[in-house]
Image (tube, rainbow, N blue to C red):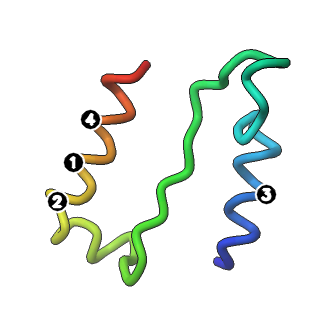
Amino acid sequence: MKLEHAVRFVQLRGGDTNGDFTGVPASQLAVFPGTTHFNGLSRTNLVLDSVTTFLDAN
């Protein structure tokens, strides 16, 4: 998947909007360079930090 496609998907789902005008959506896009869905499991510290940061903010 190209990064542009992932960004567009987030936009279509309500993310990447200006919170001053529309309210802040509870969505974010995380991109882990050099990581696939499968080997992301071996980078647990990276994933865990991103997920807990997101959850703590919402």
CA distance for labels 4 and 1 = 6 Å
Q: Residue at x 39, y 23 (%)?
A: 57
Query: For numbered disc 1, what is the local secondary structure?
Result: helix
Q: Marks 3 and 4: CB-CB under 8 Å?
A: no
Viewport quadrant of the C terminus: top left
Q: Residue 48, how many percent across, how many down?
A: 21, 48
Residue ID for mark 4: 52
Residue 45 vertical placement versus 50 (above, below) = below
Would you name the residue on which mark 2 appears? 44
The amino acid type of the residue labelled 4 equals Thr
Q: Local crowd at mark 1 within 10 Å, few (<14), some, or many (≥20)?
A: few
CA–CA distance between discs 3 and 2? 26 Å
Indicate left or right for 1 with 42 as reference: right
**Tag 1: residue type?**
Leu
Q: Which residue is mark 1?
A: 48
Residue drawn at x 73%, y 23% is 19
Residue at 82% x, 44% y: name it. Answer: 12
Q: Earlier in the sequence, mark 3 or mark 1?
A: 3
In this rendering, the answer to whether 11 lies above or below 14 is below
